[in-house]
Image (tube, grey):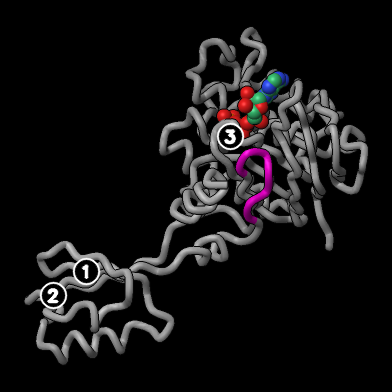
Amino acid sequence: MDAAVEARGLVKRFGDRPVVDGVDLTVPKGAIFGFLGQNGAGKTTTLRMLLGILEPDGGERTLLGEDRPLRSAHRVGYLPEERGLYPAMSAREAIAYMGALRGLPWAEGRRRADELLTANGLGAHTKSKIRTLSKGMAQKVQLLATIVHQPDLVVLDEPFSGLDPVNQEALEQLIRAERARGATILFSTHVMAHAERLCDELVIIAHGRTRFTGSVDVARRTLPTRVSLAVERPLADAAVLLPPGFGDDGAGSYRFDLPKAGLEPVLRGVLDAGAGVRDLHVERPRLHDAFMAIVADEDAK
Ligand SMILES: Nc1ncnc2c1ncn2[C@@H]1O[C@H](COP(=O)(O)OP(=O)(O)OP(=O)(O)O)[C@@H](O)[C@H]1O
């Protein structure tokens, strides 16, 4: 398979403690790939190992075909978790500077900086010093600095944190635009809504180990679909008519997992019993629910 990033059995210990304890992942070229986990799960540490900022204590990784990741550094754009640009630089210079570090000529960097700032609602701030920008604006500038050299791989560590809803939406669009340009995007998050909308593939880690690999859809299908049914007259023989393990609020509202045979036999029984259907809701689980279940499963071990 054509992978932009590959890791097998990555391990990192701090002292005696394994913080990353065997992470596997394959990021296909051209994908938007989510790296999900709770606080402290080991996401940042893993990303740093993938990028060659940290040396693993075990396992292997390749980054854009290089097993020494730093050799690919000029083809990578990385937004670290800890934000920071030189406060005395203008937005334009800060972006051009980051480009220059990755081999982009200054003049071209400045030209692209103006273009990017204008396209992303910061056209009035090309000459503003970083220290005069709001936190969210500065973060946006840093993000633009991450992609100014048009990297083949964009790695974003918690890119949505600190942004208001409008800017979170704008960032989602920017990530899609980067993919449309041909880049691969790997981003970490613990906010499921972004991952649910954006990701082609994702990995969920817990306690430093890979717990799930697959698409958003496959993750959601790890949990049963839930049915909520409300009837006019409470069912006298609910235990016969409804699937095992159903919930009952005592006032004619029931919840149960969608049976393998589908909903129709259940509904037919309820209607034949003359209960009268008042409301019916069939709800596929969200990525949030799947994440909670996968992580809880690991916690229970
Ligand atoms: N340099 C270090 N020395 C010792 N412990 C560390 C070091 N870096 C990270 N850790 C610990 O490793 C664990 C994983 O940290 P990491 O930052 O990789 O998690 P994360 O999934 O990115 O979490 P968050 O979402 O909170 O940023 C944490 O318990 C953290 O305290």
The disc at residue 158 is 3
Identify the residue under disc 1: 254
Of circles 3 and 1, the one toward us is: 1
* N-term-proximal mark, 3 vs 1: 3
Question: What secondary structure do most residues of the magenta stretch adopt?
Answer: strand
Q: Amino acid at mark 2?
A: Val
Query: Secondary structure beneath disc 2?
Result: strand
Q: Secondary structure at mark 3?
A: loop
Q: Residue at x 63, y 15 (%)?
A: 90
In magenta stretch: residue 208 = yes
Q: Amino acid at mark 3?
A: Glu
Marks 3 and 1, how far apart at CA: 39 Å
N-term-proximal mark, 3 vs 2: 3
Q: Is residue 280 left or right of residue 23?
A: left
- Taking the spot 11% from the left edge, 79% from the top edge, the residue there is 236
The Cα atoms of the two marked residues, 2 and 1, are separated by 8 Å
Compared to 113, does 271 lie above or below? below
Relative to 88, does residue 42 appear above or below in the rendering? below
Residue underneath mark 2: 231
Give the image location of residue 217, x and y in percent. Answer: 54, 65
Looking at the rendering, the quadrant in which ligand 1 lies is top right
Q: Is the C-beta of the residue carrying label 3 under 8 Å from the nearest atom of ligand 1?
A: yes
Taking the spot 87% from the left edge, 43% from the top edge, the residue there is 60
Crowding near the residue tagged with mark 3, few <14, some 14–19, many ≥20 C-alpha atoms within 10 Å = many
Q: Nearer the viewer, residue 129 or 166?
A: 166
> Which kind of residue does numbered mark 1 sit on?
Tyr
Q: Is residue 250 above or below residue 154?
A: below
- Quarter of the rendering containing residue 207: top right
Q: Which quadrant of the figure contains the N terminus?
A: bottom right
Which range of residues does the magenta coloring cover?
206-212
